[in-house]
Image (cartoon, helix red, strand yellow):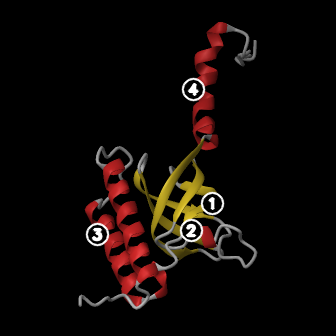
Amino acid sequence: HSGLVAFSSRDPRSRPLLESLRSPLSKMNKSFSTECLVLKNSNYKDADKLYTLFSPQYGKFTATAKGVRRINSKRLGSLDTLNRAQISFSESHREVKIIHQAQLVESHKDLKKTMSGIAKGLYMAELLHRFFYHDTSQHESAPKVYALLTKSLQSLNKFYAKYPEGSFNFV
């Protein structure tokens, strides 16, 4: 007898041990999908970017997109600051979230045409970023705050579509 014990997935006695061995890997492969607003981004390593995102389900969180700074990346435009995007991501064994796919939902392009529009949008994003100081995965007010920020950005975008100069006259 060599002291080695054989485990079988069919043996009911070995299932708890096999499940405990499998749990870190299953967390690593689990994929999530959510709609979110891009609050901030910064360069990370050679071809990656680090994003601060806000979603109704997960609150504020940070995720990295690998290879997004390469010229042929399809995700770069979808993950621009102040964009609303549908993303899929996974959580690695170090609890680092990695973005795998991103699809643009709304870009707020009229808002981004003027400096005053960009300043107002970034100001709202910064307020939210500071209000939710840490990553907030279980914050109960996240859905309401997300809806408020989304409506505010949409209203600003409509305003700058109607008044491209960013001002209007009351006559």
**In the shown orientation, is residue 109 left or right of residue 4?**
left
Q: Give the structural element (helix, strand or loop) at label 3.
A: helix
Which residue corresponds to the image point at 46% horizontal and 79% vertical from the top-left? 161
Closer to us: 102 or 62? 102
Instruction: Please give the label number shown on residue 20.
Output: 4
Badge 1 density bin: few <14, some 14–19, many ≥20, Cα 10 Å: some
Q: CA distance from mark 1 to mark 3?
A: 25 Å
Q: Earlier in the sequence, mark 3 or mark 4?
A: 4
Q: Give the structural element (helix, strand or loop) at label 1.
A: strand
Badge 2 density bin: few <14, some 14–19, many ≥20, Cα 10 Å: many
Which residue corresponds to the image point at 33% horizontal and 89% vertical from the top-left? 167
Task: Give the residue at mark 3.
Answer: 127
In the depicted structure, whether residue 30 falls above or below residue 101: above
Q: What number of labels is visible?
A: 4
Which residue corresponds to the image point at 52% horizontal and 54% vertical from the top-left? 96
Three-letter amino acid code of the residue under disc 3: Leu
Q: Earlier in the sequence, mark 2 or mark 3?
A: 2
Q: Earlier in the sequence, mark 2 or mark 4?
A: 4
